[in-house]
Image (spheres, helix red, strand yellow):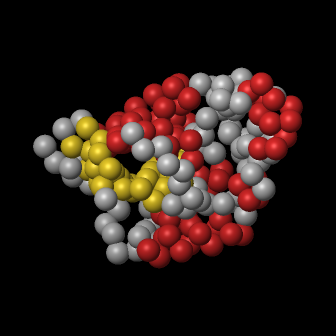
Amino acid sequence: MSTTQIVLVRHGQTEWNRIRRVQGHTDVPLNDQGRLQARTLAMELDGEQVDAVYSSDLGRARETAEILAATRGGNVVALPALREKNFGTWEGLTDTEVRERFPDAEGTGWGDGESTSEMAERTVAAVEEIAAAHPGGLVVVVTHGGPMRALLRYVDGDASPVDNCGVVRLEARNGRLRKVD
């Protein structure tokens, strides 16, 4: 069976990323730095033969993906399954505000929205479906920090944070995802 290459990308920076405000499903646009990050990444990926570009349907990921796809004249397929986790009442709060308003929440997860396992299940399923649709191809998938950590945890147990416009490369072969060093 052929191997599908996946270039997993976290969206470019938003103002809320800069000030550490919880975004979740809140549709916050890229800031100028985020657009610059996306253009820089587009140049870095310029020599690669990309078969398809997918993204979360949230604007910050979609705009990042559109910048990446523009150099290739390709379209972006937006999928809700690639969205960031829904953080419920924590959305729009800074990290400090969350600690002040919800002092007992330390270590309990993130808010009253979607669970981490729910987000992980939908994200992993979406990436596996994307890989299956492009056997032997190279696809770019633009998503968010939470889904990227969930995918990394799934493939090798490492849930390290990924910077805005950071890239992690995966391979899908025989129905299994693995991280490429």
**Residue 34, position as x, y percentages in the image:** 65, 65
Would you place residue 61 above or below residue 47 in this image?
A: above
**Residue 173, position as x, y percentages in the image:** 21, 43
**Residue shown at 30% from the left, 42% from the top:** 177
**Residue shown at 51% from the left, 60% from the top:** 166
Q: Nearer the viewer, residue 156 or 131?
A: 156
108 on left or right of 172: right
Tell me how many marks there are: 0
Quarter of the image where the N terminus is located: top left
**Residue shown at 53% from the left, 74% from the top:** 40
- Residue 102, quarter of the rendered image: top right
126 on left or right of 11: left
Would you place residue 142 above or below residue 43 in this image?
A: above
Q: Is residue 78 visible?
A: no
**Residue 145, position as x, y percentages in the image:** 57, 47
Check the image and name the residue furthest to the left.
1
Q: Nearer the viewer, residue 181 or 113?
A: 181
**Residue 18, position as x, y percentages in the image:** 74, 59
Quarter of the image where the C terminus is located: bottom left
**Residue shown at 45% from the left, 67% from the top:** 73
Q: Is residue 171 visible?
A: yes
